[in-house]
Image (cartoon, rainbow, N blue to C red):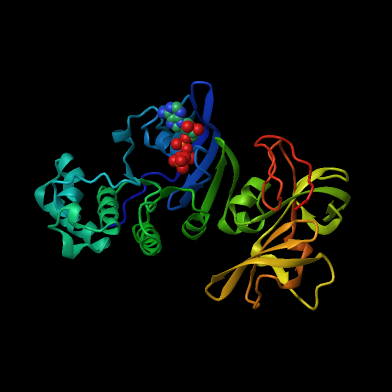
Amino acid sequence: MTAPKPGFSQLRLEGVTRRFGSQNALSDLDLTIEAGEFIALLGPSGCGKSTALNCLAGLLPLTGGSIWQDERRIDVLPPERRGFGMVFQSYALFPHMSVRANVAFGLRMRRLPKQEIRRRTDEAIRLVRLEEHVDKLPGQLSGGQQQRVAIARAVVLEPSLVLMDEPLSNLDAKLRLEMRTEIRRLHQSLGLTTVYVTHDQEEALSLADRLVVLRAGAVQQIGSPQELHTRPANWHVADFMGYRNLWPMRVQAAQAGEITVEADGLRLVGDPVGQIAAGDQVVAAVRPEDVRVDDPHATTNTVPAEIEVVEYQGRELAAEARNDAGLRVHVRTDKRIAPGDRVTLSIDPRRLLVFPSDSVERPAAGLADAAEPGTLREPRLVP
Ligand code: ATP
C-alpha cells in the first residue's frame, strides 16, 4: 500500500468543549496535531478521552470550539466526510463475513473498481500479517487477530487520520505488547497520523510522539513522553506517570531551585515545580525506582524504614517500606531485601518533585489514615 497522503499539514482543535447537561465532559481542549504525529490521549476513566475522540470523529457534536484541517473547518462535517479511520476496543467486525470481506467492505462501499479493491485489500492484509487467515470468519480468530482485521479495515481506506479508542484493552498482556509494536510499525511505515486513547501510561509513553493528559475533562499537560516522565506539570500527572510515592507535606523553607518540606518529623529536600512558598501545603512525589536502598554515599534525604512487603519482578524487587512515623514508601531495587529488614532509604533531592497541593483532594498514597473522599486531610503520617 502506498503511504496515504495525509491531506493536511495540521489538524487544530480550538477550545473543543463537550457538555452533557451540566457536566463538562471535555473543556476547552486546544491541540495542534502535525501530519505524521502519533498523539496519545491519556487519563483515568471518565476524564473525557473518548469524548475527545468522538468529537474528532464526528460521532459527537461539539458544544463549543472548532476543529480545523489547515484552513478547512471540519467539526461541521458528518463523520463520513472527514475521511478518518476508526479502531475501537470492541473490534466491531461483521461476524458473517470473512477476513477479506471485512477488510474490503469500506472499499466496496466506495464502489472502487474490483481490481483495485483486491489489490488494496491484499496489501492491507499483508501489512497486518493475516495472509494465512483471509478466508476465516472473525469467530475463528484470536482476539489479537481480530484486532488486526479491524486495523486493516481502517488503514485500507488510506485515511488522513486514524483514531484508536483503547484498541488493545481486550487482549492479554503478551498480545498487547505484540500489537503495540505492530501499531507503531504500521503508523511509521504508512506515514499515518494517529490519535490513540488509552488509560495505560506505559502504552502511551511507548507509542506516542506526544501525550495529552486529561483529568475531569480538562487538559493537565501536553508534552513528549520524556517531558511528562521527568517533569509532570502537577501531582495528578505525576500520579499518572508512575510517581507512586505522593506525600502530603508542608514547606519549611523555599529558596530558588530547592525546597525543604516536612511532615511528622520527616524533613526532605526537593525540587519545586511551580510557585511554592514557605508554609504552603504541598505534595512531594518520587518514583519507586528513584528511592535508593542502603546507599553508602547518601547524605541527604535519608529515611530509616522497615521493609514490609516484597514482590519479585524479574531482575528487580518491588517493595513497600514504612518509616517510624508510618510513612509508606514504594521502592524498586535490585538489592536483596526481605520483609522485616531495617534499611536506610534515600532520595536524590533532584528526583523529589514538590508540587503545590492544588485542591481539597489529597493523594492517598503513603498515608495509613484514609480520609473521607473530598475532605482536606492534614499531612499526618500516622500508622
Ligand atoms: P473511559 O476510560 O472509562 O472510557 P473516558 O476518559 O473515555 O473514560 P468519557 O467516556 O469521555 O471518559 O466520559 C467523560 C465524562 O462524560 C464521564 O463523566 C461520562 O460519564 C460523561 N459522559 C460520556 N458520555 C456521556 C453521555 N452520552 N451522556 C452523559 N454523560 C456522558
For residue 312, above or below residue 368: below
Residue 57: image quadrant is top left
- The N terminus, quarter of image: bottom left
Q: Residue at x 66, y 70 (%)?
A: 339
Residue 172 in percent (x, y) is at: 37, 59
Left or right: 279 as drawn, with respect to 14: right
For residue 27, above or below residue 208: above
Point out the residue furthest to the top here.
21
- In this view, the residue in front, 294 or 235, is 294
- In this view, the residue in front, 186 or 259, is 259
- State whether residue 236 appears in this view: yes
Residue 221 in percent (x, y) is at: 61, 45
Left or right: 84 as drawn, with respect to 278: left
Residue 226 in percent (x, y) is at: 60, 59
Q: Residue at x 40, y 61 (%)?
A: 173
Left or right: 290 as drawn, with respect to 3: right
Q: How many marks?
A: 0
Residue 118 in percent (x, y) is at: 13, 54
Left or right: 308 as drawn, with respect to 123: right
- In this view, the residue in front, 311 or 244, is 311
Q: Residue at x 72, y 70 (%)?
A: 292
Point out the residue furthest to the left here.
114
For residue 27, above or below residue 336: above
Q: Residue at x 39, y 30 (%)?
A: 60
- In this view, the residue in front, 78 or 44, is 44
- State whether residue 49 appears in this view: no
Residue 281: image quadrant is top right
